[in-house]
Amino acid sequence: MTQAPAQQPKNGYPAVGKILLAGAGAGGGLALALGVAEVLRTHEVFQLISGWGPLAGLALLGMVLVDRRLAESAQVQRDGAVAMQSLADSVREIARKDDIAEAQRDLTLNHVAYTVRRIADRLGLEEQAKASGGGA
């Protein structure tokens, strides 16, 4: 099998456009960084930190890491609060269902007690009737 030859750009150089684009982007980025550095040089905080030398880089890295950790910690706390609220809602629902079941149980037991009392009263009346009718 033969492979098709790679297509050459019209100018004969395979990646000239990409190289020029990358160079222009890098140059623009460098110019922007130098401009930002010039603006920051006039700022008092930057002047203070730049006097630290290599410690300035470590301080900036530490601030970035602390900022990220604080954001993660805040998210974890929000998730924990949502989970605790969900748990509280579930416990409240269980307690509500238990209260309903207890009320139904009380109602049923009261009905049974009333029915037993009525039966006992009727049996007592029948025994009295037998006793008074049998002795006469």
Image (tube, rainbow, N blue to C red):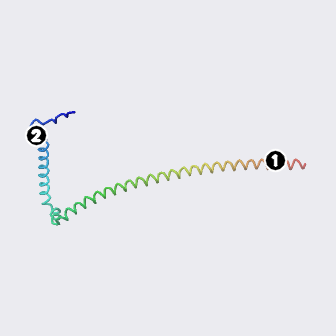
Q: Residue at x 68, y 48 (%)?
A: 112
Q: Position of residue 54 (x, y in %)?
A: 18, 64
Toward the right, the furthest residue is 136
Q: Residues within 10 Å of mark 1 (few under 14, many from 20)?
A: few
Q: Nearer the viewer, mark 1 or mark 2?
A: 2
Task: Name the residue nearer the viewer: 118 or 30.
Answer: 30
Which numbered circle lies on residue 126?
1
Q: Residue at x 22, y 63 (%)?
A: 58
Secondary structure beneath disc 2? loop
Q: Residue at x 10, y 40 (%)?
A: 13
Q: Position of residue 102 (x, y in %)?
A: 59, 51
Q: Earlier in the sequence, mark 1 or mark 2?
A: 2
User: Disc 1 residue type?
Assistant: Glu
In the displayed structure image, the side of residue 130 where residue 61 appears, left or right: left
Above or below, 12 relative to 50: above
Tell me how far mark 1 sits from mark 2, CA to CA: 121 Å
Q: Looking at the image, how many numbered discs can be counted on the residues?
A: 2
